[in-house]
Image (cartoon, rainbow, N blue to C red):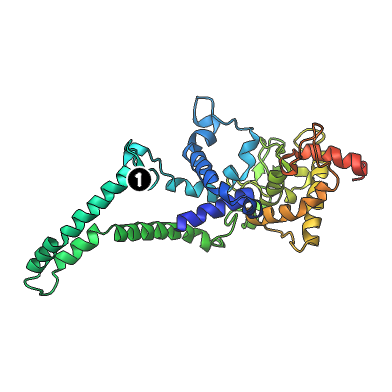
Amino acid sequence: MAVNNEVNLVLDLIFGAENLSKYPTIRPLLRIGLASHLHHYDSLARPVYHSQQRPTLPQNSVLRNIALFTNPRVLALKEHVRIAMPWDDHYKYFKKASGLPPHVLIFAQIQGVHKDVHAIPSKLESILDERQMAGPVSLAQIGRVVDESPQMRSMINDMAELKAMMQRRMPGAADGAVAGGGNTIGMRNNALLYPQYGHTDGMTRRVPSTWTIPKLPIQQMYLYWHCGNEADKIPPMKFFKHHDISFLQKRAKSTMSELRKIMLLIDNTSRSKGFPVKNSMSHEEANTCYYHGESALAAVIPDTTSKGRPRAIATMKWGSLVKYLYKKRGPAM
């Protein structure tokens, strides 16, 4: 139960609880997708220098900047992924494939129940014999009943999972982590907001020399702007100064300025609707603010594409949004 709740929370921080509430039936499919991602995580996220082979996902891929890779809570679920095949007796996940019609199996189960009922008297006799004519129940009998009970086994497994999860959370709590929050460890640490990467020009910046401004869809870019990349220790972009990106191309300063204006537009609309933007935000909080602030973008972007299809603003690249904003408001934005 604890793992199921954590999976649902992780899905909320990835896709936004408000968005998923509109399509509740898609959660089972997303759970399978998340499990598949975590199962293949090592081959996807392996850095280039760890292997001579070409990685499945290039180091400069924009996908490495979304919550699936940047939020440690997602990776923490990796140990709970189970691979189950129909022939491996994992009947919790699969029905038995017998090849028989369902009604035949039902009749067979009824017949089995009848046999069990007829066997009750003989079992009672053996139990009474073991108890020495209704004497006290032996310790061996109690232990055997407990060990053979599927309900007890299930409870023991659930308690073990809960204990393991609490033990994993304990070190983070000492560092100021909040159980059940979003980015609970790294981004809550103010040290990550200060320059920490040395560059060849002698300057220290908040990002390494290999970093580039991600070209993400606007919703994912909003999360990166407010939450950063905790897995790679990249602070939220909203804290960046000019010297942090001065090693990039000449237009980096203008790009950063344009991006900041888009984010402020979403932030201000979210605040006006009663959802304030905080200095330190989790992915869940950032998703909520985006959900309520997206209307600011909808006011300046056409509802349909050039081909007449409904436009999904959340999936648009933020660079495309800049062009629309320039057309609507002019260079001053």
Q: Nearer the viewer, residue 62 or 94?
A: 94
Q: Nearer the viewer, residue 101 or 37?
A: 101
* Left or right: 268, with 171 as reference point: right
Extreme residue in the bottom direction: 135
Judge whether 55 appears above or below 285 on screen. above
Q: Residue at x 48, y 36 (%)?
A: 40
Answer whether residue 282 is visible to the viewer in this image.
no
- Whole-percent x and y of residue 198? 66, 41
Query: Where the C terminus falls, by quadrant?
Result: top right
87, above or below 10, in the image: above
The total number of labels drawn is 1
23, 190: nearer the viewer: 23
Res. 324 in view: yes
Q: Is residue 186 left or right of residue 93?
A: right
Quarter of the figure with residue 159: bottom left
Q: Is residue 179 above or below residue 97?
A: below
Q: For residue 152, which quarter of the picture? A: bottom left
The structure residue drawn at horizontal position 9% and vertical position 63%, both measured from the top left corner, is: 126
Q: Write the residue at 40% across / 60% down.
A: 163
Amino acid carrying mark 1 in the image: Tyr
Q: Which residue is mark 1?
A: 91
Q: At 81% across and 47% down in the image, what residue appears?
A: 297
Image quarter hosting the N terminus: bottom left
Where does the image place residue 50, in percent across and percent down from the top left? 50, 31
Instruction: Assess disc 1: are there few (<14), some (14-19) or many (≥20) residues with their C-alpha within 10 Å of its C-alpha.
Output: few
Q: Is residue 59 left or right of residue 147?
A: right
Q: Position of residue 320 (x, y in %)?
A: 80, 37
